[in-house]
Image (cartoon, helix red, strand yellow):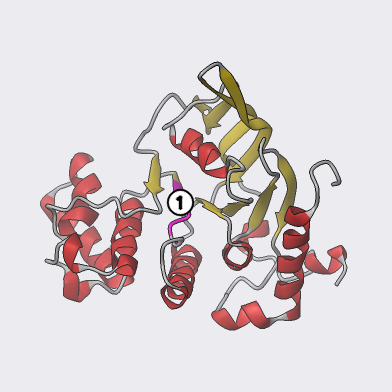
Amino acid sequence: MSEHAFQTQAQPLEAQVASSIITASHITKRYQNDHKVTLALDDCNIEVLENEFVCIVGTSGCGKSTLLRMLAGLDFPTQGKIVIKDRPVTGPGPDRGMVFQTYTLFPWLTVADNIGYGLKEKGLSKMEREAIITRYLHTMHLENFRDAYPRELSGGMKQRVAIARALATKPELILMDEPFGALDPITKAQMQQLIRSIWQQERPTIAFVTHDIEEAVFLATKIYVMSARPGRVKKLIPIYLPYNRTQDLKEREDFVALRMKINAMLDQQEGSV
């Protein structure tokens, strides 16, 4: 299938002009340890627009998680600039929600209280918090686990709670660092379907790091492909697959062709693209 064919699929809301939520310009990251300097990222440029679902893919060690942590304000570039709208990123903030691969729930809080934690921090009333918590318990199919504690949940359920907590406060940007990487294949596919469905319904802005190419193609509106260390952006690939996506999409010729195209890029030697 030609590259032109990739760009003639239905282009719904994600093809509309949107404002920039976060921009990383000329990002370089060096680590120094025992007199040795490691170049992790080199002159990376990415942009996430309002309501986009952006995936960042690359092999292990390419710096994609480091880049995401810098977008979150949990780490800082050696060179370059990161801005959210027109504000420099100087640290974490309520304008960004983060979902990690590990299950970062408060073990002493129930499912409902974990989801509502950020809402309480924002000063919402008990009635307002309850309405939002109830909504996300329903969205995440967790109604029957409202009063359960994290130790009583499966891995997939814990991540549903973590995602609900990130969504509940309506941040400008949700950052997700391989959130389904530790799940079994069946649960992983279910979670991919769930987060894509939520995105289609609510249109949050998401930046999602993964090394799973199939996952990225299924979820994204556009994909940044990273090189091996030092991490650089090798290619930006817009994804013009159908807006409404279900698991059978993964069997379609255009989906498989995109997956193979990106896989081939990652297999190429550095500098050949």
- In the image, 61 versus 20, the foreground residue is 61
Residue 233 percent coordinates (x, y): 70, 41
Q: Is residue 117 above or below residue 84?
A: below
Q: Is residue 180 magenta?
A: no
Q: Which residue is at a point 61% across and 71% down the rendered structure image?
A: 243
The image quadrant where one finds the N terminus is bottom right
Q: For the image shown, how many numbered marks are present on the structure?
A: 1
45 horizontally vs 104: left or right: right
In what element is the residue under mark 1? strand
Residue 131 lies in what quarter of the image?
A: bottom left
85 horizontally vs 251: left or right: left
Residue 235 percent coordinates (x, y): 75, 48
Residue 197 percent coordinates (x, y): 47, 70
137 horizontally vs 199: left or right: left
Q: Main secondary structure of the magenta part?
A: strand
What segment carries the magenta color?
A: 174-179
Q: Say which amino acid is labelled 1.
A: Met
- In the image, 161 versus 83, the foreground residue is 161
- The residue at which mark 1 appears reads as 176
Q: Which residue is at a point 16% across and 67% down the rendered structure image?
A: 146
Q: Is residue 58 above or below residue 83?
A: below
Residue sticking out furthest to the front = 34
Q: Which residue is at a point 80% across and 48% down the rendered structure image?
A: 269
Residue 50 percent coordinates (x, y): 55, 48
Q: Which residue is at a point 76% across and 56% down the rendered structure image?
A: 267
Residue 8 lies in what quarter of the image?
A: bottom right
